[in-house]
Image (cartoon, rainbow, N blue to C red):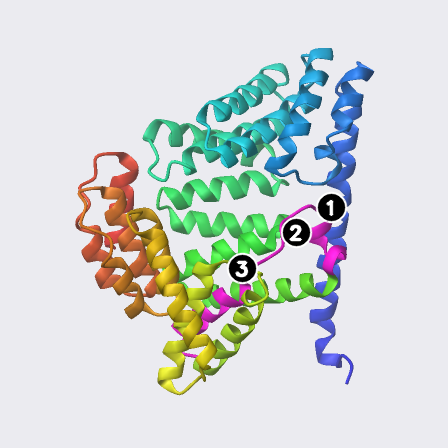
Amino acid sequence: MGPQPADSPALLASLRRRVVDEARLFARARRRRLRLEQLSEVEAARRRSRGIGIWWGSLPRAADAATGEPLLDGALAADPRYVPALLDRAFLRMLRAASEGDEAVLNTALADAVRARELRPEDTDALVMECSVRQYACVRKGAPDDAGCGEALSVCTEAVRAAPGDADPLRFLSRLYNLTCQDDRALQTLGDALELDRTRTGKIASDMTELALQNGRLSVADRVSAELVAFQELEEREGRKALARRAGVAATRGGFFLRAAVLLRLSRWEEAAAALNEELSRLSSGRGDTWTELSALLGKRRLAGRGSATMSAAERGRLSQLEQEISKEVTGDVLSAITVADTIAMMDPAAAEGWLARVPASPSCEIALRRSAVWRTAGDTARARTEAAACQPRTAWEKRCAEWASH
């Protein structure tokens, strides 16, 4: 049976969004090509910078730095004032710093972005790149310093105002809000970013769902996780033709896992079981990670205990195997153990408690707040407050996060 008359408004709205998204993708690629050609009069610089392809709409990976950086070095040797090459190199260096964990490389990325702004103070792309590098430098530390994160917040807030049609500074600002426990602002900012760039629905909707769960915003989590699943299914059907694929964005993963987490919190057991089966079918074919698979299997075991799902002997064996493997993997690694517990908490709070027990008591405010976040993910605000009470804040961000965790 084809579409019914009652479906027409929804279908028209979906078609309208798709047309707008396609137009935005085309406009971004065209603008990048024009910048590449117009912002240097030195053909040797333009030719070398063309070779990397960042500004042609395809996102690079850390592995591209090995070939891309020498090209950009050559472009800048030919024209040291070539801003697009500086920004491309800043981006590649940031990717390399993330891959290698090298802070010195990250500092050179920031230097490139700052130099680009000095050369073209009115250039919003340079401002957005500086925002990107500064927020990454803050977020990668896990426990941010007030000065560094304060500067990142300032630059990214300026970038949002200067580039109102660009989703990137909104995404970067949302990460800073999230890290510094300004969750309402983070959710709002992510929602604004999603409206501007649906090629990144996979990442943005995932982040929104997790934040909504932590803050008890279940109606938001329900709506956004349903959008996430629909986006992932469409992406899987369209393959390389999918909008996000053509924009160079990584394939969406884990949509059904997050959907199941929301449905479990809403006590919609049968729907949660169906979502977990979808997720596990993808995980078994290599589309995911073992921490997610462990958590999904624990969620299914919980549902089986309620009579809402059936767990096969193979699945029980796989669960036992993963528990042993991941237990060894995170032994002695406190932050990894907490991250595993946080993922499990979405599926089975009782199992998450067992994993948290592996994390020794610590005077660290960061550890106390991370433990508190696990219980917020599980929906247990009383336990979250108890964990947060162990934090004795020494910095502004710790004080803010301790207040958030205690409310």
Contact? badges 3 and 2 (CB < 8 Å) = no
Residue sitting at 31 percent across and 58 percent down?
374
Contact? badges 2 and 1 (CB < 8 Å) = yes
Q: Position of residue 68 (x, y in %)?
A: 68, 28
Give the residues drawn in magenta, as a range.
239-268
State whether residue 99 is above or below residue 211. above
- Tell me the amino acid under the disc marked 1: Leu
- Tell me the amino acid under the disc marked 2: Thr
Answer yes or no: is residue 79 visible.
no
Contact? badges 1 and 3 (CB < 8 Å) = no
State how far apart marks 2 and 1 are (Cα): 8 Å
Residue position for label 1: 25
- Tell me the amino acid under the disc marked 3: Gly
Residue sitting at 30 percent across and 38 percent down?
397
Q: Position of residue 391 (x, y in %)?
A: 20, 45
Q: Earlier in the sequence, mark 3 or mark 2?
A: 2
Residue sitting at 65 percent across and 66 percent down?
233
Residue sitting at 77 percent across and 85 percent down?
1
Residue position for label 2: 199
SS under mark 1? helix
Residue position for label 3: 288
SS under mark 3? loop
Q: Position of residue 168 (x, y in %)?
A: 58, 40
3 vs 2, front mark: 3
